[in-house]
Image (tube, helix red, strand yellow):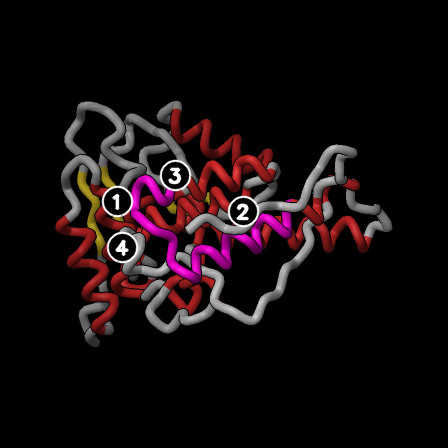
Amino acid sequence: MVAHGQMAPTELEERMNRFVSGEANVLLSTSIVESGLDIPTANTLIIHRADMFGLAQLYQLRGRVGRSKIRAYAHLCTPARFGISESAEKRLQVLASLDTLGAGFQLASHDMDQRGAGNLLGDEQSGHIREVGFELYQEMLEEAITAARAQSAGLAPPEDAFAPQITVGASVLIPEDYVPDLSLRMGLYRRIGDITERAEIDGLAAELIDRFGKLPDEVKTCWQSSKSRTTAAAPASPGWRPAPRAPS
């Protein structure tokens, strides 16, 4: 029995049902079978030209057999007349070593080691992503894309979406020697970015002084910049007074 991705959905489903029910003992298929098929009776898999598949593809294909208590076998065939590439050989060696629980995470790690993390997450990244962290950068990117789509659709952003940009001629950051832990610094940056009330900024400054000591000049500048940004974004109340000086 033959199955491939160019067949009509109804015909493909009919053939797969016949194979599952046992009307055919052999299924000749393309890599379409990697997409989550669960056939308990399938216990033998032969992959032709396994060197042409990626590591994740091979792992998914191998998982199509052995779905029940019956011992299963996956045979990965490579050409005998000429050698395979070094990268393909590494992929096959990695796949042969993944035979325990939690192998999916190991596979992802090996795949990244072989293909690299790319410029976005790799060592070549030296821009804003490396400074603010990938998670915060992703949030900023999603906000920018949402705003651009709304603008192209002729929709005006809500009034509370106003986010003023404060530019100062000084360093606005949390120094590494003040907060050595990178994840903690990133968390503080997120907290500063999420602040919407002036009282929250004062509370965060007091917390920093209590935990890490006297605020460096860079943190004072960051504190004052956040004060100005929050003040500009929020409507002034009748009893509001100018913000006090930064704590020392």
**Residue 33 point in image, percent of width and height:** 41, 42
Q: At x 33% / y 46%, what residue is drawn? A: 184
- Given the image, on which type of amino acid does mark 2 rest? Gly
Pointer 2 or 1: first along the chain: 1
SS class of the residue under badge 3? helix
- Label annotation for residue 193: 2
Q: Which residue is mark 4?
A: 180
Give the position of the N terminus as an image quadrant. top left
SS class of the residue under badge 2? helix
Q: At x 32% / y 65%, what residue is drawn? A: 115
Q: Are marks 4 and 1 in contact (CB under 8 Å)?
A: no
- Given the image, on which type of amino acid does mark 1 rest? Phe
- Given the image, on which type of amino acid does mark 4 rest? Pro
Look at the magenta stretch and give its main secondary structure. helix
Whether the magenta-drawn stretch holds residue 23 is answered as no
Q: Which residue is mark 1?
A: 105
Q: Nearer the viewer, residue 120 or 5?
A: 120
Pointer 2 or 3: first along the chain: 2
Q: Which residues are magenta?
A: 208-230
Whether the magenta-drawn stretch holds residue 224 is answered as yes
Pointer 3 or 4: first along the chain: 4
- Given the image, on which type of amino acid does mark 3 rest? Glu
Q: Is residue 171 visible?
A: yes
Q: Nearer the viewer, residue 77 or 63?
A: 63
Pointer 4 or 2: first along the chain: 4
